[in-house]
Amino acid sequence: MNDSLPPSRKQQKKANRDAILAEARTAKKPLTEAELNRLERKKRSLQNRRGRKQPAIMPAKLARTSAFAPRRKGLITDSNFVRVYEVPGYSVVEVRGRELGSQHRDAIYALFRLPRTKISLPNPDYRPGTLALQNITVYQTKTTWRELLKVTGRLEHVNNLLSMLTTLEEIKQVSLRILQGSSLAELEKIRTSRNRGHLADLPGSSSSIIEKVDWEGAQLDSPITVQYGTSVLEMIEKAYLVSINADVQFRLKSDHAKTFWPFIDSQPNHTYIDEQRLANLAGRDLWAEGMTSAHRAQFRKECREAFRDMQLAGGLAEWREEVTGAGRNKSRRYHYIHAAPRQLEMDLLKQA
């Protein structure tokens, strides 16, 4: 009976590591610890695909972040806009240039749904005798307007080309500063340094998500090339990748559902999420000064609408809301079951 149950996360990680070590023993060159960790992350990502068709394979910090506001209108477009978005345990991202919304998230997810290639280009800053590299490595996606509209589920019509280009250009305006620290201790270190006007002593990177957009015409089948920034390159190179069911993402109607789904879908072993984490993803603090019981009630209404939307879109098989705590500490926990089994579970079912 117990043999048919899916393995725990600890058992799965051990099985992955044992399989990778077995492969490493037969290799001509032994693998380093960093290479083993990278291969293990890649194996977990493949197991999380849940039999999806053309998923969005993307950096985890772009899936598990609150850097995209759960709305399409009323976004701050001031070029002096600066805000730090925190999801404790997962990401700390500083956005500069303008506020990003649901339409920007969808465009990025569409790009990561398409194949990308790694190329080497001449470095325009290279000078003989300096430390600058002669060539630089970039990732880019080559596609057509038609394919880009198709993967977002939008009508394949020339009238939609300008709005798609505008969205990409708005993403290009934004600079992301991504800090590697995300634990509570590291978050406190980041906040303390920021309050003092200092840079926290932690690894990080700063660049735009999109570095360049080139297109060869305004017809549906005209080629378009999107080049990614160095932050995205680094995350791809280190295999910090997760798999997202993009079909569900583009079927969602609620902006809050679009905010919650990537986090939920990229966590294959999770079966519930607390409202505090949902608030983190939406860029809110439910218990901050000025937040009233009416604000919390409205947010909980938006959460219920989001979970209903995720179920209607085919992402979740079922869900339920649980009240936790008592009195002023009363909170909510949302339990859910994925509509699609993980790849590992599908393999077990096939074997059975």
Image (cartoon, rainbow, N blue to C red):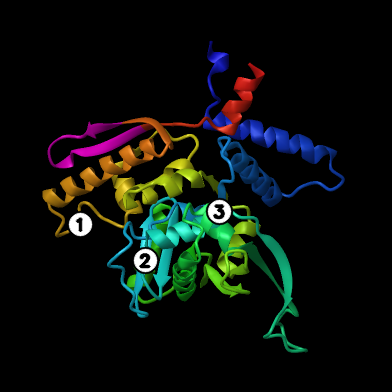
Q: Quadrant of residue 140?
A: bottom right
- Residue 328 lies, in percent from the top left, at 13, 42
Element marked by disc 2 = strand
Specify the amino acid type for callout 3: Met
Going by the numbered disc 2, the residue's amino acid type is Val
Residue 237 in the image: state x and y as whole percent: 65, 58
Residue 190 vs residue 209: left or right?
Answer: left
Q: Is residue 270 visible?
A: yes
Give whichever of 35, 167 is nearer the camera. Answer: 167
Label 3 near label 1: C-beta < 8 Å? no
Residue at which label 3 appears: 58
Regarding mark 1 in the picture, which secondary structure is present there?
loop
Q: Amino acid at mark 1?
A: Ala
How many numbered discs?
A: 3
According to the picture, the residue beneath numbered tag 2 turns out to be 84
Pointer 1 local density, CA inside 10 Å: few below 14, some 14–19, many at least 20:
few
